[in-house]
Image (cartoon, grey):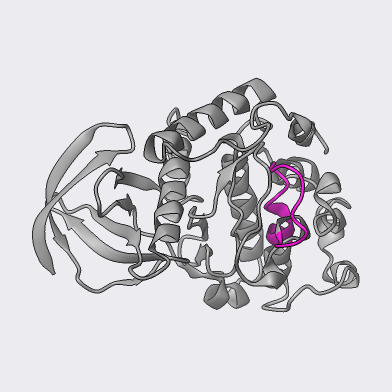
Amino acid sequence: MIAGKVQFRLYTGEQTEAEAEIDDLEFPAGEFLVARSVRLADGTELRQHRPASGPQRREGYERLDNEILAGRRLCEAVGWGGYPLELARLHGDEATSAEPYTLFHPYLGEPLREAGRHIIGDEFDSFVTGLLTGLCWLAGAGLAHRALGLDTVRWDGRRRQVQITDFSRSTVFGVPRTPVTGTPGWISREQRAGTAYGTVGPRDDMWVAGRLIFFVRNQGEDLTERGQIASSGLDELFGGLFNRVIGPPEGRPTAWDLLNDGLGRRAPVPHPADGRTLIASRERFMLARQQRHPDAAEPPGFNHDLDWGGDHGPGG
């Protein structure tokens, strides 16, 4: 452990500094980022994310920017209530120095890659409800995760708690879709290199969410064809909506749809916000990015294409 001071901006925007013990052992935190444990003098345990060293350090800076902007946007969006355990929580960040970092509260549970094969019985109901609840919170903040998977979604069996982590590839609704890196089998067609099209909206994460639900339901079986859904009973469970999850984004149900209309549960937030609210959210997102990267170009038609707004109507 290394003793020293950390100076950072709280998620509320206030600057602070604290004595801390910093672990000198680093471990991967997604693509282009590394993590290490930090313990503040008041006993608060945190995990610090930093860009990995090497030739792709610039990509690490960009991923860290996404974590900061998404983390602060989520804190703002849920600030009127208790922060949901379904989402990893940003504590603060240092974004202006030559060695930027984020500070997150410790993650819960284990990645689904290990834990997902052992969720059985009524635990499955808790898993599905938790995953969809987390995605509803993301959509309520106008954010798409874009990197859901076996390593970024976690399960705490003792608490029966889902947690979505790693916002390093997230973005706001309404921007043009760009290719997502990762395992091709876990990236939807509209987000793959060579086939990316359209604008980001609340259905972008649902293709992978459906695969994760199937994976857990069938103790680790991979979803490779539509016929598997019928034998799994998932379409019946979700009132006929689940079969559309693995289709094109224009016809997919949202997390709100699956939770409210499919399972008959009350979503924790209203249906995703209207266009005016999300445009304002996008403007704040881009203003923060512009302050970090003055030479960065704004995406074409950034605040003029409202096709994605159709994704917010009840029932798709």
Q: Quadrant of residue 299?
A: top right
Query: Is residue 268 visible in this depiction of the protein?
Result: no
Which residue is located at x 51 percent, y 51 percent? 86
Question: Which residue appears farthest toward the front when viewing the image?
Answer: 295
The x and y percentages for residue 266 are: 67, 38
Examine the image and state in which quarter residue 79 appears: top left
Q: Can you tell which quarter of the image residue 280 is in?
A: top right
Please tell me which residue lies in front, 99 or 233.
99
Q: Which residues are magenta?
A: 192-210
Residue 115 position within the rendered picture, expressed as x and y whole percent measured from the top left: 54, 74
| Quadrant of the image containing the N terminus | bottom left
- As for residue 56 lying within the magenta part, the answer is no
Q: Residue at x 68, y 77 (%)?
A: 219
- Asked if residue 40 is positioned above or below residue 141 in the image, the reply reads below
The main secondary structure of the magenta stretch is loop
Residue nearer the viewer, 203 or 155: 203
Q: Position of residue 67 (x, y in %)?
A: 44, 49
Look at the picture and state if 146 lies above or below 176: below
All told, the count of numbered labels is 0
Quadrant containing the C terminus is top right
On the rendered structure, is 52 left or right of 99?
Answer: right
Q: Residue at x 89, y 67 (%)?
A: 230
- Residue placed most toward the observer, 255 or 170: 170
